[in-house]
Image (spheres, grey):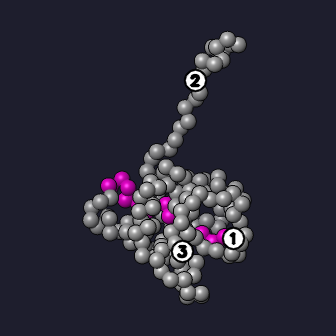
Amino acid sequence: MWNLFNWHKRKKEPVVVDTSVVLPINKVLNKLLEAWPWLNPGRLWPADTDYVMPLENELEWAVFNSPVIRYEYIDEIENCDDFALLLHADIVRRRYDEYKKGKIPENEKHPWAFGDIWYQDPVRGPHAINLCITRDKGILLIEPQGGKIRKPQKDMT
């Protein structure tokens, strides 16, 4: 029982962290809406019912070993939306290859929580990048033109 003399002995309630690997679609949408409450849920189109959240180091390995981040920028032919689409496709291909080699446990037989997003960059204007929900760092944004990985900013529109 709390009183004036034992307040300092109270233990803080433990923070519950979701350490599960598989994320159902409703939790994917919730995580995106928590990050950007102004998003229109009707404009979010996840294609699968469950997704796997990789660790940040798994994401980094996949991105930095993708040939896409070394492609040459060519205005209107190979620009931001093309880079984002190709990196997304490469992540899907790697997941397929890992499955065919028997490297994916049965309970993780889902795609990564990885996709493309388009937004209004305050400096560049309209821009496309990739997004991944990781289980240790939450939402991370990937600049496919070079492979830079960062936390999202709240003011992205």
Report how far apart the C-alphas of labels 1 and 2 lie in the structure.
Answer: 44 Å
Residue 106 in magenta? yes
Report how far apart the C-alphas of labels 2 and 3 lie in the structure.
Answer: 47 Å
Picture quarter with the N terminus? top right
For residue 122, what is the image quadrant?
bottom right
**Residue projecting furthest to the left:** 101
Which is more N-terminal, label 3 or label 1?
1
How packed is label 1: few (under 14 Cα within 10 Å), some, or many (20 or more)? few
Q: Which mark is residue 145?
A: 3
Report how far apart the C-alphas of labels 1 and 3 lie in the structure.
Answer: 15 Å
Which residue is rendered at x = 57% and y = 78% of the image? 81
Q: Which mark is residue 11?
A: 2
Q: Is residue 137 above or below residue 122?
A: above
Residue 115 in magenta? yes
Q: Is residue 75 above or below residue 62?
A: below
| Residue denoted by label 1 | 121
Which residue is rendered at x = 60% and y = 53% of the image? 30
Residue 15: x, y in percent? 56, 36
Residue sitting nearer the eye, 33 or 8: 8
Q: Which residues are magenta?
A: 105-121
Residue 23: x, y in percent? 48, 53
Q: Is residue 130 above or below residue 4?
A: below
Amino acid type of the residue that numbered disc 3 sits on in the rendered structure: Gln
Amino acid type of the residue that numbered disc 1 sits on in the rendered structure: Asp
Horizontal side of 112 relative to 124 (left or right) equals left
Q: Secondary structure at mark 1?
A: strand
